[in-house]
Amino acid sequence: MHFQLIFNRTVLSLALVCVLIAIYAYSPAAKSGKRNAGRTPPDPEEPLPASSSPLHRFKSAGIATDNDACSRIASETLKLGGSVVDAALAALLCNGLIGMQSMGLGGGMIMNIYMHNERRAYTILSREMAPRSLHADNFTVFASEQQLKQSGLSIAVPTELLGYALAHERFGKLPWLELVRPTLSLCHSGYSLYKHQYDALILNADMIKSDTLLRQMFVDPVTYNFWPIGSHIQPPKQLCDTYEHMSIAGPGSFYKGSLLARLYADLHDIGSGITKADLTYAQAELKDSIVVPLDEYDLHLTPPPGSGHILGLILNILHTYRADFAAGSDLDALAIHRIIEALKFGFVQRWQLDDKADKVVSFVSVDSMSKNVVNNVNLVTS
């Protein structure tokens, strides 16, 4: 039995993604329509070309995942009568197989679910946790950060499936087996290697090639190079067996059932500090999402350790400058400076809230905080 657990997986905050995309969309690099070759800056006067992406129109639902295969699985789940959460879980299980460099059974998750009939949103918090036996002294034996990252002590307690189980129990309709079955079939048939995964292989070449199963999966035994983009990738039988067992026994088998002993044995073999108790007592939480008003809209955001409060603060800071942003067709240097300051002040707040903080981020606190930030923004220096 073998599990490839993801090292130091981080859930990227929605705030960072949304706002940085906005910055890029107005930047000269985006308007040039070209990749920046070398270090020569692109021509900011060059008009943006038409997008090469085809226009899609959807009758019932629009689904976007990291891979077409996972989007199709989510679509078929909806056609079977599954809920939106069922479709999301089916897609996540697929992404965990095809996109194992980014997520999977060995990670953790945060899910924000809006229930239209209730007019409210819920957050499932199921982030990875440090083993209970881990102490600062454990890290003194490593000569470098890279050495630590490649050791078993860098692995956190995996909680991804706990989050899936809670989401399915609370918001799902289809049997668990129906959600796992498409990914199990994909595991047996294999998939095509794509650029993002290939790039991840290159960045982690030593680790991948030193692992027996990953080497068999991604490395040409003749040339000892990684298979080129577009090559057929066949996941190992051990991983497919895990999906099959979990599809029948349920996600709880990973923590308290028949898979627990084998998972613990694998972790122990690579020097992990995770114990059976860590796995058995791990939990996912269901909480109300944070609601932050923004004009006539309500933002439904994830509480800590998610960064919803950061997104709410940043958008309220930027809201103050909305009239200035709308006055011009392009963002000038001052506007970009204000966006950077909003990001900077926003992310300072992230480190002032503990993961277990019960602080309610209300409209009053966010509104007053954002006004205070605006008054302290230096329009000349950062």
Image (cartoon, rainbow, N blue to C red):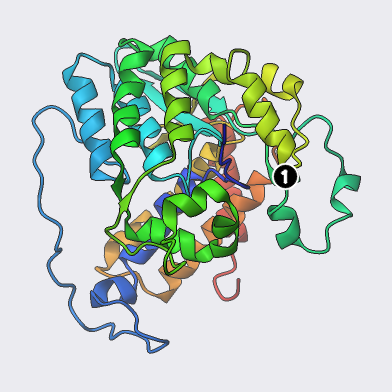
Q: Nearer the viewer, residue 302 or 339?
A: 302
On screen, 378 above or below 103? Answer: below
Q: Report the residue at 78% width, 63% height from top.
A: 144
**Residue at x 38% of width, y 33% of height:** 92
> Can the viewer see residue 314 in this picture?
no
Element type at marker 1?
helix
The image shows residue 312, relative to residue 161, as above or below, that is below
Q: Is residue 343 left or right of residue 190?
A: right
Q: Residue 260 placed where, x, y %?
A: 63, 20
As drawn, is 213 to the left or to the right of 88?
right
**214 left or right of 40?**
right
Q: Quadrant of the C terminus?
A: bottom right
Q: Position of residue 222 (x, y in %)?
A: 42, 66
The image position of residue 378, as x and y in percent, is 59, 68
The residue labelled by disc 1 is 152
Give the quadrant of residue 274.
top right
Crowding around mark 1 (Cα neighbors within 10 Å: few <14, some 14 to 19, many 20+) is some
Given residues 181 and 303, the one toward you in this image is: 181
Identify which residue, 293 or 255, lies in the foreground: 255
> Which quadrant, please, contains the N terminus?
top right
Q: How many marks?
A: 1
Residue 248 visible at all: yes
What residue type is disc 1 on? Gly
Give coordinates of residue 100: x percent, y percent.
45, 44
The quadrant in which residue 307 appears is: top right
The structure residue drawn at horizontal position 42% and vertical position 75%, both measured from the top left corner, is 333
